[in-house]
Amino acid sequence: MRMVDAIQFHEKFGEVCPVNWEEGKPGMKPTTAGVAEYLAAHAKEL
């Protein structure tokens, strides 16, 4: 089910889902800069 949610999220927003992503949580841009930005903003949650 997680895979279906992740695919739908990507189709809707153009972003990818990090590990342990749940619906309603932010995704990240599928670029090196996007991953770095996500990690910088969410490091304490990881």
Image (spheres, helix red, strand yellow):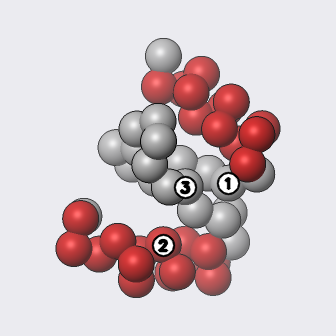
Task: Name the residue type under label 3.
Answer: Gly
| Placement of 6 over or under 2, stated as above or below | below
Q: Which residue in the structure is indicated by mark 2? A: 38
The Cα–Cα distance between marks 2 and 3, rounded to whole angstroms, is 8 Å
Residue 27 — which label? 3
Q: Are marks 1 and 3 in contact (CB under 8 Å)?
A: yes
The Cα–Cα distance between marks 2 and 1, rounded to whole angstroms, is 11 Å
Q: Quadrant of residue 4?
A: top right
For image coordinates 68% across by 63% down, the residue present is 30
Number of numbered discs: 3
The Cα–Cα distance between marks 1 and 3, rounded to whole angstroms, is 6 Å
Q: Are marks 2 and 3 in contact (CB under 8 Å)?
A: yes
Instruction: Give the SS element for disc 3.
Output: loop
Task: Name the residue type under label 2.
Answer: Tyr
Place of residue 18 in the rendered image (x, y in percent of width and height, measured from the top left): 46, 53
Quick one: quadrant of the C terminus? bottom left
Return the disc, 2 or 1, that comes first in the chain's sequence. Answer: 1
Is 1 left, or right, of 31 in this rendering? left
Return the disc, 2 or 3, that comes first in the chain's sequence. Answer: 3
Task: Name the residue type under label 1.
Answer: Glu
Instruction: Give the SS element for disc 1.
Output: loop
Q: Which residue in the structure is indicated by mark 1? A: 15
